[in-house]
Image (cartoon, rainbow, N blue to C red):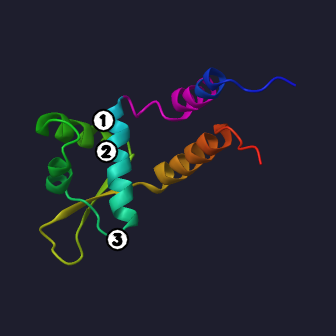
Amino acid sequence: MQTMTAFKRLKTIREFEKARMPHLRSHEDFDIVIEVGYHEDMGEPLTLKCLLLIGITSTSTTQRRVHALVEAGILTRNRSASDRRSIQLGVSSQTRKLVDRYVQILHAQAPKKKV
């Protein structure tokens, strides 16, 4: 039985990305979604200002990418319950399911440790 090479694993992962995640066009898009989702999971949703302070990319690029991701339904914008002036970013439920599946595929592609 032939073992799966690193390139085969990467190819499988990349095929999933192209087929199921074409809206995440760049590393910046992935990074934005990861940061927004992470902070949301920690109970501290990000505002655009906070996301800009993380410094993923330039201010204009971050603003443009967030707008595109919201328009594509990947991210959401919601008013803060505690401060109605503040807009918090979130990850859509559909994107959460997709990211969960993506993580499962990454985990499945990881080489198994021999005991």
- On the image, the x and y values in percent for residue 31 come to 34, 42
Amino acid marked by disc 2? Ile
Report if residue 12 lies within the magenta region: yes
91 versus 107 height, above or below: below
Q: Is residue 75 visible?
A: no
- Going 35% across and 29% down the picture, which residue do you hit? 26
Say which element carries label 1.
helix
Residue farthest toward the right in the current orientation of the protein: 1
Earlier along the polypeptide chain: callout 3 or callout 1? Answer: 1
Mark 3: give few (<14), some (14-19) or many (20+) Cα within 10 Å.
few
- On the image, the x and y values in percent for residue 27 come to 35, 32
Q: Please give the residue where the numbered disc 2 appears in the rendered image.
A: 32
97 versus 3 height, above or below: below
- On the image, the x and y values in percent for residue 35 come to 33, 51
In 3D space, how far apart are the residues under numbered discs 2 and 1 (Cα atoms)?
6 Å
- Going 46% across and 30% down the picture, which residue do you hit? 22
Q: Please give the residue where the numbered disc 3 appears in the rendered image.
A: 43
User: Which quadrant of the structure image shows residue 2?
Assistant: top right
Q: Please give the residue where the numbered disc 1 appears in the rendered image.
A: 28
Q: Is residue 14 visible?
A: yes
Residue farthest toward the front in the current orientation of the protein: 115
